[in-house]
Amino acid sequence: MNTIIVKYIAIILLICIVTIGKGQNTSAPDNNLQTEQKLPKIHNPHKATIYSALIPGLGQIYNKKYWKLPIIYGATGIFIYAFDFNNTQYNKYRTAYIQMKNNEITNFEGYTDAATLLRIKDSYLRNRDLNVIVLAAIYMLNIVDATVDAHLFDYDISDDLSLNVQPTVKRTYANQSTVGVSLSFSF
């Protein structure tokens, strides 16, 4: 199990180094000046989505949200460990349950009833399956987070954000006056 995790991390680091090292240096020649001008780099949400779908966390690196990587990999590591623990315990109690049903053993870790072993086995099975669901949710949240961050990457918030509230008198369709409040946003 540990060698798989080490290989997985090594592959992620290798891809991150290769991806970060490649910069887009697009330039458009100006016919009048005969010099190269750098075009502004456009942040691509589709690229961030694909990166995060291929390798969790790579979309966050593309979006320059490096602080999210420990959260993604920490949560993933915790639930992989929990999956492994629950799977091991499930297999152990399943084997003990089968052996007790076949009258090969009469006592397993202090339990003498096959029904108790069945409940414990089912509990570990349920926990294992929930860990798989949580891992899938972490994976999907990783992709959604990278996509949303990429969409908001170039979002510019002006310093002039204001709300103007004024009383208003309006005419209705029946030509009557009504009093109300007018809200206007400026940004």
Image (cartoon, rainbow, N blue to C red):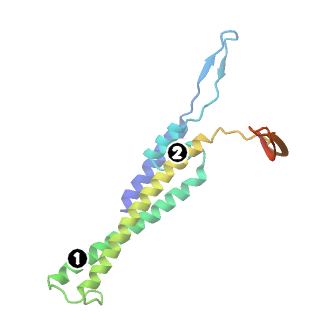
The amino acid type of the residue labelled 1 equals Thr
Q: Position of residue 181 (x, y in %)?
A: 81, 47
State the residue at coordinates (33%, 69%): 87
Q: CA distance from mark 2 to mark 1?
A: 42 Å
Say which mark, if any, is on residue 125.
none
State the residue at coordinates (84%, 42%): 169
> Could you tell which of marks 2 and 1 lies nearer the N-terminus?
2
Q: Is residue 52 left or right of residue 36?
A: left
Quarter placement of the N terminus = bottom left
- Dot 1, how many residues are within 10 Å of its Cα: few (below 14), some (14-19), or many (20+)? some
Q: Residue furthest top?
A: 32
**Label 1 belongs to which residue?**
95
* Dot 2: element: helix
**Label 2 belongs to which residue?**
59
State the residue at coordinates (59%, 35%): 43
Q: Are marks 2 and 1 in contact (CB under 8 Å)?
A: no
Q: Position of residue 128 (x, y in %)?
A: 36, 68
Q: Is residue 69 left or right of residue 85?
A: right
Task: Identify whether 53 is placed above or below 32.
Answer: below
State the residue at coordinates (27%, 76%): 92
